[in-house]
Image (cartoon, rainbow, N blue to C red):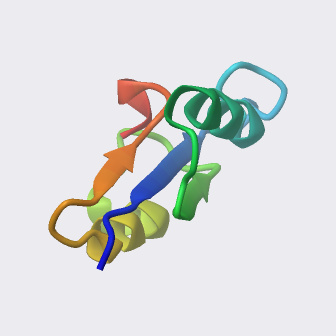
Amino acid sequence: MASKRVFYGRQSKGEDVQKYSIDAQKTLVENKFGNIGLYFQDIGISGTKGLDAREGLRNAVDSLKRGDELVVAYRDRI
């Protein structure tokens, strides 16, 4: 099975029109890395919340297999 890139984006409340919007994050990652195999996101969730409150991040991590890459636009989105 071929490896894949998995996108994770997080958008806090009020960030929908800023550089941290999900669309802006996707564009940045696609321009930098090219083809993305899967997309996961959490919207309206603070970065201070734990993994148990961030379903998108949990699902992104669970989807990873050996050789896959988790890609994010900015480290603070994790």
Q: Residue furthest left?
A: 66
Q: Position of residue 23 (x, y in %)?
A: 76, 39
The residue lying toward the viewer, choosing from 29 and 12, is 29
Question: Quadrant location of the C terminus?
Answer: top left
The residue lying toward the viewer, choosing from 73 and 32, is 32
Q: Residue furthest bottom?
A: 1
Q: Residue furthest top?
A: 19
Q: Residue at x 53, y 26 (%)?
A: 32
Q: Residue at x 31, y 68 (%)?
A: 52
| Left or right for 66, reference 35 | left
How many marks the image carries: the answer is 0
Q: Residue at x 70, y 19 (%)?
A: 19
Q: Quadrant of residue 60?
A: bottom left
Q: Quadrant of residue 50?
A: bottom left
Q: Residue at x 62, y 37 (%)?
A: 30
Whether residue 50 is situated above or below residue 3 in the rendered picture: above
Q: Position of residue 73 (x, y in %)?
A: 50, 30
Q: Residue furthest right?
A: 17
| Left or right for 63, reference 66 | right
Question: Quadrant location of the N terminus?
Answer: bottom left
Q: Position of residue 41 (x, y in %)?
A: 57, 57
| Left or right for 68, reference 20 | left
| Left or right for 2, reference 26 | left
Q: Quadrant of residue 61?
A: bottom left
